[in-house]
Amino acid sequence: MADRRRPMRPVAPVPSADLPLVAIVGRPNVGKSTLFNRLVGRRQALVADTPGVTRDRKEGLAVMRGRTIRLVDTAGLEEAAPDTLFGRMRASSESAVRDAVLVLFCIDARAGITPADEHFAAWVRKQGRPVMLVANKAEGRGGAAAAMEAYSLGLGEPVAVSAEHGEGLSDLMGEIVDHLPPEPEPEDVFEEEDEFEPDVEAQDPDAEIVLPARPPGPIRIAIVGRPNAGKSTLLNCLLGEERMITGPEPGLTRDSVAVTLHDEGDVFEVVDTAGLRRKARIDEALEKMSVSASIEALKMAEVAVLVLDATLGVHEQDLQIARLIEREGRACVLALNKWDAVEDRNATRQAILDRLSISLAQMRGVPVVTFSALTGASVQRLLPAVREACEVWNARVPTGALNRWFEAALERHAAPLVDGRRLKLRYMTQVKARPPTFVIFGTRAEQTPEDYKRYLVNGLRETFNLPGVPIRLQTRGTK
Ligand code: GDP
Ligand code: GDP
């Protein structure tokens, strides 16, 4: 019970010097902090008040359209500097603007353009950074007139939003991303890595293939499961406060795409929860929708947290979602929720695991976490399990060790006969991580029957400790 709403530990921003910096500026009270909190997604979490982090700004990571940016909030800093209002605004914004690849210049669409806005806009224009004009407090019909007036600032077309009501944020995020310089390198984790095509003749079975390391950034999680498994309760519990997901105000969740969590120095991002909620609410065909919403979230994630209502056991729809996780090639952590309401815990756990591993070989050895999202008990075990699963998903097996194991595996169970002739399987290489992907080379290797592949995959999983990730095994025939 004591765990309920355990706040995740606030940490200093992750090393992020390479991430593009976007500064929110404007006169006091236009809603800069509100906007910052909206875009960063979690109040306070990343506020840089820890030693070693620059003092004069509040900074957080925000994720939009798959890109992570550093967002700087210059609000509340005015008091620190002396002088006139303008002097204070300028002092607080100077360093942020200097470092920014994009400046969000905020105005209050209800109050209209004030002399302070004009003065400040003139200064910002002179700094020579790309600027986007954001007309905040434009909820309902309130902001249209001021938005027109805002053209006079000479900062281009205003983007109307309501930070407080969560309106227009999706468009704003799209515009922000459009204004960013191109990404330095293709680090999009969702892209398939280039298929490695080894030169079969020249291939030395002991040669190491250097696979690319995991790109930096938060570990992306999809929380999936059928309706009522407790997904949103879980997310609220992880967030340590009830906000965003179950808020009663219409439109509150509409624009939120990702939520950031921190644990023991690791940063996690829960993707597309809003999509899950939205679809689940609107669509009447709940059963169907929850599956297609899951696919969407899975495509963006590295690790899937499959939430089951442990009091109900495993149902066909749970298996369907588990199959999707496998098909999309994601790591999986099995979350048995509502553990508070389970009577015979050992039997329940066993029954669920048996059912899963019978139906889905790839679920064998999947990491399991039992908790109660409602009371918060043991929920703190989840993120460490997610991190471990992500490590496995990124694992690299040394080629030497792989082939020593492969030889032994071939000895234990000789390669099968196909059309009366034995397959000559020669060696194996890992060609990809995320998920771990192996290729067998050999004469007519492509004819390797499925059951023999399963034997090898199970062996790989056990020998190299790769639980909870779908292992891909490919074959390449040689002459
Ligand atoms: P800052 O000084 O620029 O950081 O402004 P704050 O974020 O502290 O917001 C100033 C006030 O405006 C607060 O009372 C907010 O609740 C309010 N506010 C922020 N965004 C909106 C909005 O979209 N609509 C309305 N009506 N009020 C807002
Ligand atoms: P979702 O549809 O997967 O997002 O599920 P919800 O989070 O909306 O939860 C569905 C129902 O299960 C709600 O009535 C929750 O209060 C309840 N629930 C969620 N987690 C737990 C839990 O750990 N224990 C118990 N007893 N009930 C829970």
Image (cartoon, helix red, strand yellow):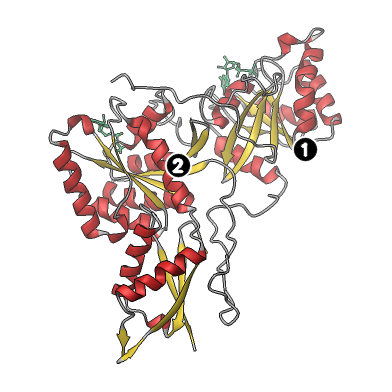
234 or 385: which is nearer to us?
385
- Classify residue 464 by image quadrant: bottom left
Report the Cα–Cα distance between label 1 and label 2: 37 Å
Q: Is residue 177 left or right of residue 439?
A: right
Q: Where is residue 52 in the image (x, y as percent from the top left)?
A: 67, 23
The residue located at (67%, 40%) in the rendering is: 19
Mark in the foreground, 1 or 2: 2
Between 77 and 336, the residue placed more toward the observer is 336
Rendered residue at 35%/68% (across/down): 456
Marking on residue 130: 1
Q: In which quarter of the image is ligand 1?
A: top right
Regarding residue 423, the answer to whether it shows in the image is: yes
Compared across the picture, whether 36 is left or right of 337 comes to right
Q: Quadrant of residue 335?
A: top left
Q: Say if mark 1 contacts mark 2, CB within 8 Å.
A: no
Say the numbered circle drawn on residue 26: none
The N terminus, quarter of image: top left
Callout 1: SS: loop
Q: What residue type is labelled 1?
A: Pro
Q: Residue at x 34, y 75 (%)?
A: 411
Q: How crowded is mark 2: few (under 14 residues within 10 Å), some or many (20 or more)?
A: many
Q: In which quadrant of the rendered view does residue 3 lie?
A: top left
Q: Dot 1 surroundings within 10 Å: few (below 14), some, or many (20 or more)?
A: some
Closest to the observer, 60 or 180: 60
Looking at the rendered structure, the kind of residue marked 2 is Arg
Image coords of residue 442 (percent x, y): 45, 81
* Left or right of residue 445: residue 413: left
Q: In this view, does 167 lie above or below 82?
A: below
Give me the disc on residue 387.
Answer: 2
The answer to whether residue 256 is visible is no
Relative to 457, is 247 above or below?
A: above
Q: Residue at x 84, y 25 (%)?
A: 122
